[in-house]
Image (tube, helix red, strand yellow):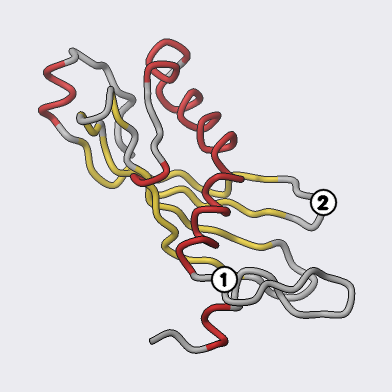
Amino acid sequence: VRSRRQRQMCIRDSPKTAHAMNVNPESCEKLIIDLLQPAIEEEMVKYYGEDLGKRVELYNYEMSILDLTAEPYKPTTVTLKITPMIGAHHPIGDYELYFSVDNAGEIKRLSFKPLKIYPETIERFQLTLPEME
């Protein structure tokens, strides 16, 4: 059973903001991922190159928030784990992306880290990936 505090984590209570009551954490996570989707797609094109980057599919159910930090007077930071796919069933790899979002909505990538590559997908689709660092 979730506490009232856990259900209200998506939007902070203050006199000048909207109030979110009974918001579950899954809804908040989905909203954050949806808002970051264009920035994530841009990073995939930068990493994989134009041709492969446009073929890569990003499904929000293949993304999760690993960490979220929101402190007063500082940009919010979000660490995501993503698994880009070729088609619906062929994962290319697992990656960790770290973003900051300021109060004007500007999104900056702070880091991009490959975690794991799936060789069966690479071989099946004859993909050429950037070297893992």
On screen, residue 8 versus residue 67, left or right, reads: right
Q: Residue at x 89, y 73 (%)?
A: 16
Q: Position of residue 60 (x, y in %)?
A: 42, 43
C-beta proximity under 8 Å, tags 2 and 1? no
The answer to whether residue 71 is above or below residue 62 is: below
Amino acid marked by disc 2:
Ala
What secondary structure is found at the residue carrying circle 2? loop
Q: Residue at x 75, y 55 (%)?
A: 102
Q: Position of residue 96 (x, y in %)?
A: 40, 49
Q: Earlier in the sequence, mark 2 or mark 1?
A: 1
Instruction: Estimate how packed mark 1 is, as few (under 14), some (14 to 19) or many (20 or more) residues with alpha carbons within 10 Å.
Output: some
Mark 2 vs mark 1: in front? 1
Q: Residue at x 39, y 37 (%)?
A: 59
Q: Position of residue 87 (x, y in %)?
A: 28, 23
In which quadrant will I find the N terminus? bottom left
In 3D space, how far apart are the residues under numbered discs 2 and 1 (Cα atoms)? 24 Å
- Farthest residue to the right: give it: 16
On screen, residue 43 versus residue 131, left or right, reads: right
Q: Position of residue 15 (x, y in %)?
A: 88, 79
Would you name the residue on which mark 1 appears? 23
The answer to whether residue 131 is above or below residue 75 is: above
Q: Which labelled disc corresponds to residue 104?
A: 2
Question: How many marks overall?
Answer: 2
In which quadrant will I find the C terminus? top left
On screen, residue 61 versus residue 5, left or right, reads: left
What secondary structure is found at the residue carrying circle 1? loop
Q: Residue at x 61, y 45 (%)?
A: 35
Amino acid marked by disc 1:
Val
The answer to whether residue 110 is above or below residue 86 is: below
